[in-house]
Image (tube, helix red, strand yellow):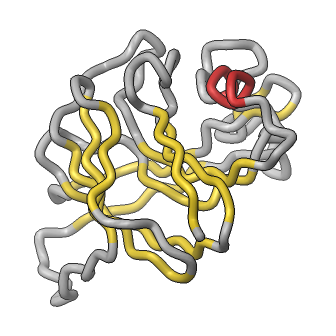
Amino acid sequence: MEAGTYLLECYVKTGGVFHSYNPDPDVYGMVHEFKVTDEASGASEPIATVQVDISSTNGIQIEGEMVSGAQTVAVRFSDQIVHENFVGHDIQVVRISDELNLGDLQEWMDWTRAAGLQTPAPAQFLGGLNEMPAGSTGYFNVILEPGRYALISEVPNTASKGLFKEFVVQ
C-alpha cells in the first residue's frame, strides 16, 4: 500500500442499514481509519500454499490445490475494473452447504439489490481480500475442513464473469 490515510469499513447491511452508518455511537459505525507510513515494517512476504489469479477477463483461476488445514492464499489482481455495482472485483471464500442455493448466494453478493449483503448471510464466509489495484498481490489465511467451497467476488453476475469458482477440499 502507498503511504496515506485509509478507511476500513463494513458493507454488510442489517435492516437495510449499512454497518458503516453511524446514526448513534452505540449503533453500527463499523468504520476504522488507519494510516500507512513510508517506513518499512521489516516483515517478510508470506509464503503462499496456493496462488489465485483474479481478472475481469479470465475470472478466478486457482494454481495449486486447496487442502484441509491452514492455507495462506496469495491473490494476484491481474487487472481491475469498476463493475456495474460501482466496485472492483474482490475475492471471498465461502463454505457451501447442501441447503445453499448458489443463485441466492450470487445475488446476495450484489449490494445494490435490496437483499444484497443483508444479514444473515446465506452461507459461511471464511475470509478473503477486498479489491486491490491491477498488478497487486494480497494474502489471506484460511483454515479449511473437508467440504465444498467457492471463491466469489462481490459483483453482479459472478458466474457469467468467471468470478465464482467452486472447489472441494478432501
Q: Quadrant of the N terminus?
A: bottom left
User: In the image, 142: left or right of 87?
Assistant: right
User: In the image, 57: left or right of 167?
Assistant: left
Q: Nearer the viewer, residue 163 or 9?
A: 163
User: In the image, 128: left or right of 13?
Assistant: left
* Position in image of residue 51 (x %, y %): 27, 62
Name above or below for residue 34 compared with residue 48: above
* Position in image of residue 157 (x %, y %): 51, 16
Name above or below for residue 7 compared with residue 67: above
Name above or below for residue 87 compared with residue 79: above
Q: Nearer the viewer, residue 25 or 75?
A: 75
Q: Nearer the viewer, residue 9 or 90?
A: 90
* Position in image of residue 156 (x %, y %): 52, 17
Residue in view at x 25 percent, y 47 percent: 53
The quarter holding residue 137 reads bottom left
Residue in view at x 42 percent, y 46 percent: 130
* Position in image of residue 139 (x %, y %): 33, 66
Q: Quadrant of the C terminus?
A: bottom right
The quarter holding residue 144 reads bottom right
Q: How many marks?
A: 0
Residue in view at x 62 percent, y 22 percent: 111
